[in-house]
Image (cartoon, rainbow, N blue to C red):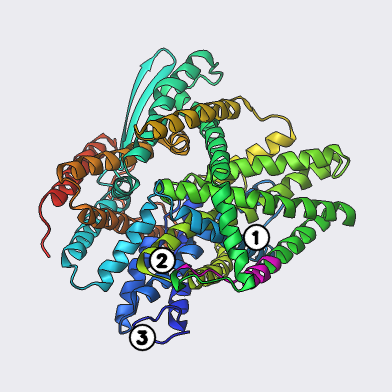
C-alpha cells in the first residue's frame, strides 16, 4: 500500500475511513428500506464525505478518494438484504437475526457479486447505450475536488448541492414543502392518474440518464396508469368496495406491477443473450492471464484469476456451509445436502444472470432508480420453483417440510440479493474508476473489503430495529404499538410470492403478459436502432411500469430538460449541466442520510416536522410544485449562460 504520493490509491487510512463511513450508510439504508422500501445510493455521498475527511487530514489524491467511496458505497448498498432477511422473521422461521448466519451469508453473497462484475466491467463500461449516471456524477465530483482550476464546475456542484439540500430539508425534514403531487380522474370504477415527484436528485439523475431512457420510462408509466389499470379496474371485481383511486393503487401494487416484473425479466434475459459473445471474450481475456498473456495497462488490470478462484472458493464454501447448517436444523442430513446443493446451484446459475440484469439497469437509469427488487422477485420465483420440484420428488414432505422449504428459499435468496445489490452498485463505482484512471484490481479488492465491513453492521442494526419497532405482522413483544411497526414492504412481498408458489396461489397472468410485451418491445427497439430513428430500451419501459409513476415522470422531466438545453446550447455546456445534476444528487443524498439517521435516533419518522397532525397537505403540495418549477428554471438558466472559470 502506498503512502501519500501523487499516485497514492490503496492506503490504510482510506480503508479505515471507508469502514467508518460504512456504519452511517448501512444503518441508514437498512432503516429506510424497512420503513418505506427505498434506499439511498451511497456512491456520491461517500465521494463527498471522503474528500472532506481527507482534506481535513492534509489532503488525498483523487485515486485515494475514489477507493474510499468505492468501499463505502459497496457496504452501504449491501443493506439491500433488508429485502429478504426480515421475511424469515415474518414467516416465523427466526425469532431474531443470528449474527454469524446473517453476516457471513451477506458478506459471502456480496463477494460473489464482486466477482460477477469483473467480466461484466469490460463489456458494460464500453457500451455507449449505458450512461451510468451516478458513476459519471461521482467521477465529475472527484475531478472537481482534485482540479482547483475548475472553479466554474465546483461552483455549479456546490450551488446544486446546497439548493437540493435546502429543498430536501424543507420537504422531508420540516414538511413545509410537498414532495410530490397526484391528480386523479375517475370514470365509473376506473381511475386515470398522473403523478410527479419533486425530487432534485431524480431531476439530476434524469439529466444524466438521457432522452431515450427517460422517454421509455415515461411511456411505461403512462401505459400502465392511463391504459392498463383503468381497463383492469373496469373488468376486475372490487370486493372490498374501495374508492376508485384506492382500487387503482391496489391494482398496481398487486397486479399491474408484475407486468413490469415480467417485462424486466424477458428484457434482462435478452440483455444477457445479446452480451453473450462479449462476455465470453472478456472471460477468455481473464483466463489468458494465467498463461502470462496479460499485457493490459494498469487501468485495465483486474484481480488475477488465482485470486478470483480463491475468493470464489472461499465464498461458496461459506455459503454452502451456512446452507447446510440452516437446513440440518430442520431436516435430516440427506435432505440438508440436497437443499445445499440446489441452493448453491441456484446461487451460481442465477447469480450471473441477476448481476448482469442489475448492472445493466443501473447503467441505464442509475443505482437509485434501478428496480433491483423486480429482479429479486424473479430470482425468488426461480428458487421457489426449484424447491417445489424437489418437494414433488419426495424431499421435504409434510407441513414441516413446507415451512422449511419456504424458509430455505428466503435464506438462499439473501445470498442472491447481496450479489445483485453489489452488482447494481459496483459497476457504477468501476465506471467512476475508469473515468479517473483508477486501477480496477484495487477497486475490486476494496469492494471485497466493503462487503465484509457492511455485513458486520447489518445483523445488529436489524435486531435493534426489530426489537424497537417490530415489523408489520411480526411483533417481538406483546403490547407493542403496532402503529410504529416498520412496514417492511419488500420482505412482505417476497414472503407472499414464495409462499404463493408453494401453495399454488400465485397469479401468473400478469407475468406472462409482461413477457409477451417484452418480446414485442425488443422487436420495436431493434427496428428503431436499425433504421437510425433512436431507441426504445425495453428494460427502461419495464422499469417505468414497475416503479411509482412519480419517479418515472421526474426522471423523464430531467431527461427532456437536458435534451432541450443541450440542443439550445449547440452541444456546449454539457460539463456544466453534469456538475449541476451531480450537485442535485449529492445535496439530496447527503441530506437524506442525515435525516434518516436523525429519524433512527429519535424513533420518529419526521422529528423536525412543522406540519400539524391532520392538516390538509394541499397547500404544501402547491408550495412544493412551485419550488420544483423554480428549480427546473434555475437548472436550465445555469446551463444556458456561459459559466465563469
- 228 or 310: nearer the eye? 310
Circle 1: element type: loop
Q: Main secondary structure of the magenta part?
A: helix
Residue at image location 12% in from the left, 65% down from the top: 645
Residue at image location 49% in from the left, 32% down from the top: 522
Q: What residue is disc 1 on?
A: 97
Q: What residue is disc 2 on?
A: 433
Q: What residue is disc 3 on?
A: 5
From the viewer's perspective, is 178 left or right of 250?
Answer: left
Which segment is the magenta one? 300-313
How far apart in space, not on screen, are marks 1 and 3 (Cα)? 44 Å
The answer to whether 354 is drawn above or below residue 314 in the figure is above
Look at the numbered discs 1 and 3 and tell me whether their residues touch, using CB distance below 8 Å: no
- 117 or 411: nearer the eye? 117
Q: Nearer the viewer, mark 1 or mark 2?
A: 2
**Residue 182 occupies quadrant:** top left
Residue 195 location (% of width, % of height): 33, 32
Residue 69 location (% of width, % of height): 41, 68
How far apart in space, not on screen, are marks 1 and 2 (Cα)? 35 Å
Amino acid at each position: 500500500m502506498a503512502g501519500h504520493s501523487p499516485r497514492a490509491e490503496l492506503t490504510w487510512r482510506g480503508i479505515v475511513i471507508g469502514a467508518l463511513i460504512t456504519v452511517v450508510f448501512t444503518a441508514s439504508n437498512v432503516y429506510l428500506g424497512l420503513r418505506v422500501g427505498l434506499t439511498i445510493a451511497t456512491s456520491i455521498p461517500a465521494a463527498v464525505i471522503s474528500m472532506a475527511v481527507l482534506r481535513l487530514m492534509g489532503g488525498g489524491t483523487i485515486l485515494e478518494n475514489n477507493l474510499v467511496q468505492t468501499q463505502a458505497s459497496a457496504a452501504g448498498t449491501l443493506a439491500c438484504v433488508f429485502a429478504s432477511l426480515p421475511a424469515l422473521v415474518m414467516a416465523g422461521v427466526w425469532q431474531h437475526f443470528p449474527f454469524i448466519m446473517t453476516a457471513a451469508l451477506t458478506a459471502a453473497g456480496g463477494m460473489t457479486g464482486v466477482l460477477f462484475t469483473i467480466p461484466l466491467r469490460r463489456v458494460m463500461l464500453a457500451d455507449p447505450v449505458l450512461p451510468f449516471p451516478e458513476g459519471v456524477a461521482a467521477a465529475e465530483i472527484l475531478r472537481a475536488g482534485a482540479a482547483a482550476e475548475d472553479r466554474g464546475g465546483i461552483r455549479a456542484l456546490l450551488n446544486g448541492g446546497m439548493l437540493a439540500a435546502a429543498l430536501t430539508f424543507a420537504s422531508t425534514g420540516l414538511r413545509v414543502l410537498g414532495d410530490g403531487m397526484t391528480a386523479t380522474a375517475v370514470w365509473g370504477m376506473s381511475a386515470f392518474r398522473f403523478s410527479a415527484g419533486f425530487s432534485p436528485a431524480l431531476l439530476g439523475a434524469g439529466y444524466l440518464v438521457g432522452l431515450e431512457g427517460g422517454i421509455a420510462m415515461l411511456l411505461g408509466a403512462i401505459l400502465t396508469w392511463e391504459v392498463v389499470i383503468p381497463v383492469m379496474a373496469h373488468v376486475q371485481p372490487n370486493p372490498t368496495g374501495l374508492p376508485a383511486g384506492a382500487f387503482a393503487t391496489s391494482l398496481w401494487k398487486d397486479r399491474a406491477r408484475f407486468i413490469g416484473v415480467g417485462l424486466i425479466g424477458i428484457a434482462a434475459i435478452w440483455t444477457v443473450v445479446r452480451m453473450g459473445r462479449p462476455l465470453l471474450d472478456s472471460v477468455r481475456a481473464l483466463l489468458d492471464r494465467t498463461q502470462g498473456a496479460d499485457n493490459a495497462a494498469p487501468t485495465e488490470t483486474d484481480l488475477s484469476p488465482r485470486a478470483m478462484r480463491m475468493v470464489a472458493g472461499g465464498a461458496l464454501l461459506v455459503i454452502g456451509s451456512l446452507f447446510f447448517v440452516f437446513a440440518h436444523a430442520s431436516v435430516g442430513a440427506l435432505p440438508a445436502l440436497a437443499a445445499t446443493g440446489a441452493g448453491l446451484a441456484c446461487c451460481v446459475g442465477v447469480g450471473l444472470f441477476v448481476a448482469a440484469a442489475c448492472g445493466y439497469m443501473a447503467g441505464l437509469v442509475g443505482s437509485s432508480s434501478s428496480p433491483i427488487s423486480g429482479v429479486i422477485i424473479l430470482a425468488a420465483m426461480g428458487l421457489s420453483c426449484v424447491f417445489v420440484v424437489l418437494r414433488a420428488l419426495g424431499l421435504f414432505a409434510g407441513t414441516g417440510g413446507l415451512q422449511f422449504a419456504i424458509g430455505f428459499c428466503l435464506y438462499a435468496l439473501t445470498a442472491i440479493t447481496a450479489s445483485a445489490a453489489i452488482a447494481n452498485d459496483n459497476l457504477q463505482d468501476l465506471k467512476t474508476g475508469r473515468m479517473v484512471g483508477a486501477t480496477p484490481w484495487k477497486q475490486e479488492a476494496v469492494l471485497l473489503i466493503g462487503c465484509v465491513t457492511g455485513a458486520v453492521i447489518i445483523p445488529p442494526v436489524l435486531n435493534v430495529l426489530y426489537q424497537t419497532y417490530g415489523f408489520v405482522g411480526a411483533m417481538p413483544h406483546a403490547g407493542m404499538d403496532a402503529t410504529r411497526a416498520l412496514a417492511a414492504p419488500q420482505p412482505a412481498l417476497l414472503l407472499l410470492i414464495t409462499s404463493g408458489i408453494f401453495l399454488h396461489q400465485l397469479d401468473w397472468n400478469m407475468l406472462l403478459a409482461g413477457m409477451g410485451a417484452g418480446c414485442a418491445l425488443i422487436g420495436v427497439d431493434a427496428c428503431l436502432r436499425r433504421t437510425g430513428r433512436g431507441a426504445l430500451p425495453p428494460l427502461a419501459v419495464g422499469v417505468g411500469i414497475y416503479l411509482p409513476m412519480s419517479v418515472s415522470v421526474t426522471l423523464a422531466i430531467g431527461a427532456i430538460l437536458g435534451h432541450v438545453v443541450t440542443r439550445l446550447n449547440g452541444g456546449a455546456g454539457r460539463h456544466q449541466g453534469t456538475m449541476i445534476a451531480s450537485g442535485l444528487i449529492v445535496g439530496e443524498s447527503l441530506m437524506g442520510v442525515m435525516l434518516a439517521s436523525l429519524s433512527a435516533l429519535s424513533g420518529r419518522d419526521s422529528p423536525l416536522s412543522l406540519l400539524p397532525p391532520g392538516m390538509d397537505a394541499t397547500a404544501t403540495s402547491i408550495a412544493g410544485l412551485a419550488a420544483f418549477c423554480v428549480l427546473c428554471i434555475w437548472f436550465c438558466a445555469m446551463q444556458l449562460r456561459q459559466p465563469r472559470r
